[in-house]
Image: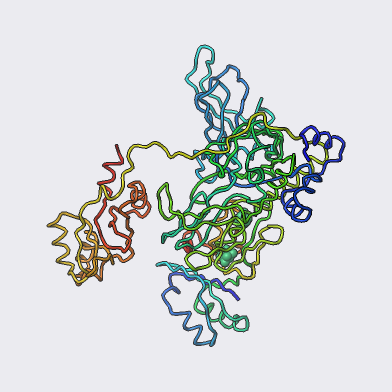
Amino acid sequence: MLLLLKFDSKTIRKPIISKATLETNALINILRANVGARKGEMVVEVDDSKARDVEEVFRRFGVEVVELREGIVKDEGRCVHCGLCTSICPVEVFEFDENWRVVVREERCVHCGVCIGVCPCNALSLPVNSINKDLKFHTI
Amino acid sequence: MKKTIEEINRKITEGSVCVVTAEEMKEIVEELGVERAAKEVDVVTTGTFGAMCSSGVFMNFGHSDPPIKMQRVWLNDVEAYTGIAAVDAYLGVTQLSESRGMEYGGAHVIEDLVRGKDVELRAISYGTDCYPRKKIVTEIALEDLNQAVMVNPRNAYQRYKAATNSSDRILRTYMGTLLPNYGNVTFAGCGEISPLNNDPEYRTIGVGTRIFLCGAKGYVIGEGTQHAPPFGTLMVKGNLKEMKPEFMKAIVMPGYGVTMMLGIGIPIPILDEEMAKATAIRDEQIITEIIDFGVPKRDRPVVKRISYAELKSGRVEINGEEVRVSPLSSYYMARKVMEELKKMIERGEFFLTMPVERIPTSGVLKPMRQREVKLVKSVMTKAVTISPETSVVEASKIIIEKNVNHLPVVDEKGVLIGIVTSWDIAKAVATGRIGKVAEVMTRKVITAMPDEPIESAARKMEKFNISALPVVDSRRRVLGMVTSEDLSRLLAR
Ligand code: SF4
Ligand code: SF4
């Protein structure tokens, strides 16, 4: 399960990830992080069986938690199947099918947001409001 | 076994013509051989669908009352060229909107017109006795225009250089986003199904050839600009009023600008065995080069020679590592173009023409005649370098004594490991961090190479908001410094 964690100025300074690991014994894999002076966002991966408990800990410390159930969304009306996104996505979400159409394997998506700024047709978006405008993930 | 265009056209009228797509033709020749394929197939349809920046539309708006001789004209705030007759203008696809910048441009105006939308026309003039009006603002749609003719100086590139990026930063280019350290490769063109590759001698594609241009019938009007076989190009025209929106697409290459993807299809008559052989060409036989956009010069280094087959496989090897490859053209759409053209011919709606004149089968692409290209090495000054062991206080003395603002920090071999500026030193002193410079220096240093053009160094400084770059050799040994003051003095001229 992928979780989007939103920290505010109070929670950002606390070692909450470590606490969550200690309390729940769950391995927490940080896929993406952007931490500023006053707020921060993080995408983490936890085993489905432990997701509930981990979420519980984060919430208790005042962290906003969003479950990222859906991956990247491609607007079929806009996509021209140019394939630019296929070499950009770090986890190879985009592939050509046998008719040279670009298909999306969204279950692999780790919400890094990189592809969104690369598509020349503005066809890609992430379903939850995970990319805060002022805290853009400068992965690229 | 020879056929003429007239015979083929007669078959089209009778409904007995045999049309296949370029993709199908490869299989047919493989199966039946050149001789039988030439006998059975009459027409091969080829197609391409990709970004073609050198495109635009001539328009005639009709006269207003009182009339105006347009001096400047904007359509949805995108300027068109009107240095021709009073109400004629040329709108190029890459022209950007004056209010919306990179998000909207000429290509979007053209697509909006084809989709039947109203567009705001605004024009100004100095006013004359015959054209007294000085200003006009109105709405127009495609049907209101007397003529709207797409005329594209350079389209349908036969093949194109592929791109990669050796530098350590992301590049936003007309070849798409290029990831650092050879992170990906992008290429353009449709290879074996692309029109000119199927008639490499340009026997049937020439001035006057009727083509499929964005859903309408269009014509080749000559070789395109920068035509340099086997990197051939075409100049084409077609009636915008007959075009279909699904065969054109305004796009924004992030960080680069607006352009337009166009669908072009060309029918190739199989006049003889030679044409059957030509249309059997495979991606393996179409060779291009991967060039390095990490080097900001016109003559970018070639990383590798490569075939379209390798590029289309989605992965290539560079320096022993597998690198993912993205096309920029859409094969899916190029196929649609081939299929559509095939249907038009089969339905008897599209007849073939022979060129009235051939286009050149050779040519070279000359570089611009320029005033001398200034390189960084000609403007760099001596660098005052220090070791990481230098104390902050010592560094501040050097800055004052030598009257410099930047001190590159080097190891014992002269290799750059950091930089301190007078600002870093002042800040360190103010906050009481007066230990070694190693503790206060910036480690990620933006640098220049000695034979880099000065424009490229200037762009780096602007982009990273810094005022000087250490000049380093390939082993990152410091050779000198180049400062924004030195450059602005030169570039201002
Ligand atoms: S980059 Fe955009 S238009 Fe191109 S294939 Fe990907 S989603 Fe489609
Ligand atoms: S958001 Fe990141 S992981 Fe998801 S599809 Fe885009 S590039 Fe791939």
Rendering quadrant holding ligand 1: bottom right
Percent of width and height locating residue A9: 43, 70
Q: Is any atom of residue B239 visible in this view?
A: no
Percent of width and height locating residue B88: 58, 24
Specify how the rendered protein is coloured. rainbow
Horizontal arrangement in the rendering, residue B21 relative to residue A68 (left or right):
right
Q: Nearer the viewer, residue B425 or B403?
A: B403
Q: Nearer the viewer, residue A77 or B472?
A: B472
Q: In the image, is residue B478 above or below residue B88?
A: below
Q: In the image, is residue B488 above or below residue A101?
A: above
Horizontal arrangement in the rendering, residue B51 relative to residue B4 (left or right):
left
Q: Is any atom of residue A70 visible in this view?
A: yes
Percent of width and height locating residue A15: 44, 80
> Which residue is drawn at the image coordinates 28% and 41% (left, top)?
B490
Percent of width and height locating residue B370: 37, 37
Q: Quadrant of residue B63?
A: top right
Horizontal arrangement in the rendering, residue A112 relative to residue B194 (left or right):
left
Q: In the image, is residue B277 above or below residue B14?
A: below
> Which residue is drawn at the image coordinates 57% and 63% (left, top)?
B315
